Amino acid sequence: MISKDKFVAARKASGLSLESAAEKAEMSKQGYVNREKRPEQFRLCELAKVYEALSDTAKPILKDAVSDIFLP
């Protein structure tokens, strides 16, 4: 089961706003909002760029969220 909450939690744990996360992922704010609502639509390149911007505390949260997509 994919948890949308983990993607949001990772972003918030790093203090990233929707705008800044979208900028890091090189997409529009609305595009990022849509990805958080349907995280299976994230592209790996988008996740990698956001991951680089996360704090050390938030990185494991995002790793766990991504593993939910690929290892249900």
Image (cartoon, rainbow, N blue to C red):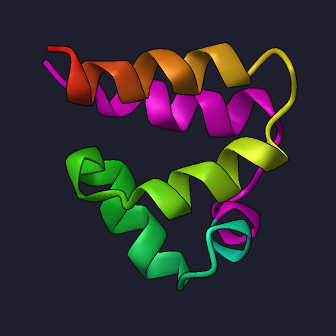
Instruction: Report if residue 23 lies within the magenta region.
Output: no
Q: Is 4 placed left or right of 33 in the picture?
A: left
- Image-quadrant location for residue 14: top right
How many marks the image carries: the answer is 0
Quadrant of image for the N terminus = top left
Q: Nearer the viewer, residue 2 or 46?
A: 46
Looking at the picture, how far across and down is residue 55, in whole percent? Answer: 86, 29
Instruction: Report if residue 15 lies within the magenta region.
Output: yes
Q: Is 59 placed left or right of 37 in the picture?
A: right
User: Which residue is at 64% across, 14% downward?
Assistant: 60
Q: Is residue 17 above or below residue 19?
A: above
Q: Is residue 18 above or below residue 39?
A: below
User: Which residue is at 55% across, 27% downward?
Assistant: 62
Q: Which residues are magenta?
A: 1-21
Q: Nearer the viewer, residue 18 or 23?
A: 23
Q: Please, which residue is most extreme toward the bottom here?
A: 28
Quadrant of image for the C terminus = top left
Looking at the picture, how far across and down is residue 59, in whole percent? Answer: 70, 24
Q: Nearer the viewer, residue 42 or 10?
A: 42
Looking at the picture, how far across and down is residue 46, in whole percent? Answer: 53, 62
Q: Is residue 17 above or below residue 32?
A: above
User: Which residue is at 27% across, 19% downward?
Assistant: 68
Q: Is residue 52 above or below residue 14?
A: below
Q: Main secondary structure of the magenta part?
A: helix
User: Which residue is at 79% across, 38% downward?
Assistant: 54
